[in-house]
Image (tube, rainbow, N blue to C red):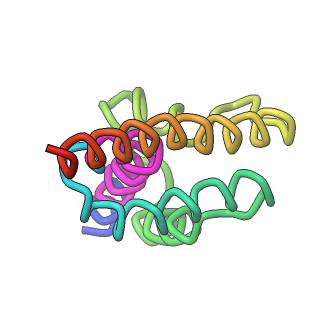
Amino acid sequence: MNLLLADALVVAHFLFIAFVVAGGALVIFWPRAAWLHLPAALWGAVVEFTGWICPLTPLENHFRELAGGDAYTGDFIAQYLLPLIYPENLTREIQLMLGAAVVAINIVFYTLAIRRHRRVAAG
């Protein structure tokens, strides 16, 4: 059960990261999504810029330890999701670039959302 919880946290973590990076695209067509996305994007950028650890990481590690450690080598989560969430050679410079990428990508999405909203409002 603990391993299942740890794996579920990895999936949730991955989905949250995807939402932080690309959730601004939802705002283009569903402007109210900004109420969820802006705080998430802000959190994602702050975590990268400051080097903080997301609270999901220690929680996942806690459940892995309760389950007896890394007992699932070779499955989908270990093979594909963990390296995306926890890259091996993550440096401070890479974290800063990731934070800047989050901000830049979302500036593009929100610019498109504002333009679309203005077009729709105008006629």
Q: Is residue 60 left or right of residue 88?
A: left
Against 34, residue 87 (above or below) is above
Q: Position of residue 54 (x, y in %)?
A: 59, 64
Q: Position of residue 102 (x, y in %)?
A: 58, 42
The front one of 61 and 72 is: 61
Residue at horizontal 61 percent and vertical 36 percent from the top: 104
Q: Position of residue 28 (x, y in %)?
A: 28, 43
Residue at horizontal 56 percent and vertical 71 percent from the top: 55
Against 36, residue 10 (above or below) is above
Residue at horizontal 77 percent and vertical 33 percent from the top: 94
What secondary structure do most residues of the magenta stretch adopt? Answer: helix
The part of the chain drawn in magenta is: 8-26
The question of residue 115 being in magenta is answered with no
Q: Is residue 33 left or right of residue 83?
A: left
The front one of 7 and 43 is: 43
Q: Position of residue 90 (x, y in %)?
A: 75, 35
> Can residue 73 be seen in this snapshot?
no
